[in-house]
């Protein structure tokens, strides 16, 4: 059974196929308007969501299907009834289930049951829909990612883990910049024995030099209780940082952005920023993921 849980579950051939379909959907949306007729996407959100919720809901509708949001409180997910039993019950009514939660293990365990196709809409461990969409945007703006330098400035979080998984497949150059206090705790997780083209540093000017794309995220993840923000005061991505990048470098952020914290408002609203194109492309890539499961 097909699931979409982690980037590392796929090979380049399959990911490229998803990207080609997304490109076709974006260019010729009417050709796909009935591809999901009589199909229902169930969505369980245990974490706040704007872009994931709306892009999946509108995306399935534009494919001719139905998006059904299921409140965790009303269905008692993992409380009134086990998650496994709820999954089995839901499989009698819906065709695909999207889960966004704080426990990646639950998503992995439910997908292993092979009761129905499951999409990871974000977990504490990874965010595969975001990163595949980001690859789509990079391809649109910069061309083939293979010979590009991508720089991540920020925490070791779910988005970065998915980005690293993508790098292991496509082998592009990846620089990871974070405060030395954060880097010290996570460097062995970031750079494994078989890693190639990955560099980790606490020096931001070194990490962004000649970068084709700078990516960042909130310094503290949604729902996380931590005082780590104090380490990031010198890690804002702004116009001064961009002076060290390649000529046509772009800025990416998965959003929501905390303006004038991890990114300056001036850069976020500049011509270098592609964050709104990123957000738009989420829908096309996720529509492709949905179609691949039917």
Image (cartoon, rainbow, N blue to C red):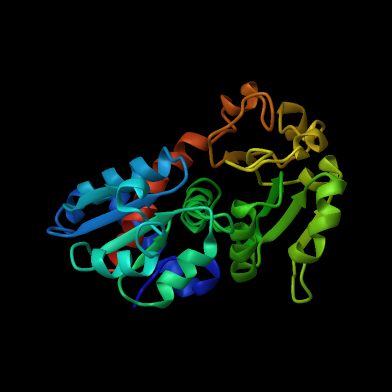
Q: Which residue is pictured at 83% across the width and 40% down the height? A: 205
Q: Residue furthest front?
A: 80
| Image: 197 above or below 69 | below
Q: Residue at x 47, y 45 (%)?
A: 47
In the displayed structure, 164 sits above or below 14; it is above
Q: Quadrant of the C terminus?
A: bottom left
Quarter of the rendering containing residue 118: bottom left
In percent of width and height, residue 120 lies at: 44, 59
Q: Position of residue 43 (x, y in %)?
A: 33, 52
Of the pair 263 and 73, the residue shown nearer to us: 73
Frontmost residue, 150 versus 192: 192
Q: From this viewpoint, which residue is outermost toward the top?
A: 266
Q: Quadrant of the N terminus?
A: bottom left
Is 164 situated left or right of 290 in this image? right
Rendered location of residue 260, percent (x, y): 67, 24
Number of numbered discs overlaid on the protein picture? 0
Residue at x 44% of width, y 66% of height: 16
Q: Does residue 171 show up?
A: yes
Front residue of 275 and 250:
275
Question: What is the quadrant of residue 31 in the picture?
Answer: bottom left
Q: Is residue 275 left or right of residue 54?
A: right
Q: Residue 6, how many percent across, how many down?
A: 51, 66
Asked if residue 6 shows in the view, the reply is no
Q: Residue at x 60, y 54 (%)?
A: 158
**Vertical arrangement, residue 4 with respect to residue 275, above or below:** below
Q: Is residue 101 left or right of residue 126?
A: left
């Amino acid at each position: 059974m097909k699931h979409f849980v982690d980037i590392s579950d796929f090979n380049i051939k399959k990911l490229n196929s998803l990207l080609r379909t997304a490109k076709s959907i974006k260019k010729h949306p009417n050709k796909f308007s009935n591809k999901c007729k009589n199909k229902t996407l169930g969505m369980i959100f245990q974490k706040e969501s704007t872009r994931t919720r709306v892009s999946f809901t509108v995306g399935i509708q534009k494919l001719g299907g139905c998006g059904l949001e299921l409140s965790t409180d009303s269905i008692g997910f993992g409380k009134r009834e086990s998650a496994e039993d709820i999954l089995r019950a839901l499989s009698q009514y819906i065709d695909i289930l999207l889960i966004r939660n704080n426990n990646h293990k639950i998503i992995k365990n439910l997908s292993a049951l092979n009761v129905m196709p499951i999409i990871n809409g974000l977990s504490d461990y990874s965010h595969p829909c975001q990163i595949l969409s980001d690859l789509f945007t990079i391809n649109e703006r910069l061309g083939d990612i293979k010979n590009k330098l991508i720089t991540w400035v920020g925490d070791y979080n779910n988005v970065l883990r998915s980005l690293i998984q993508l790098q292991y497949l496509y082998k592009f150059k990846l620089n990871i910049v974070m405060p030395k206090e954060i880097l010290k705790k996570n460097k062995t997780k970031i750079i494994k024995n078989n890693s190639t083209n990955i560099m980790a540093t606490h020096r931001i000017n070194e990490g962004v030099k000649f970068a084709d794309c700078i990516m960042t995220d909130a310094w503290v993840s949604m729902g996380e209780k931590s005082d780590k923000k104090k380490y990031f005061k010198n890690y804002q991505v702004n116009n001064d940082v961009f002076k060290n990048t390649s000529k046509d470098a772009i800025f990416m952020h998965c959003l929501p952005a905390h303006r004038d914290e991890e990114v300056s408002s001036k850069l976020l609203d500049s011509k270098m920023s592609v964050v709104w194109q990123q957000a738009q492309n989420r829908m096309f890539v996720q529509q492709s993921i949905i179609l691949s499961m039917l």
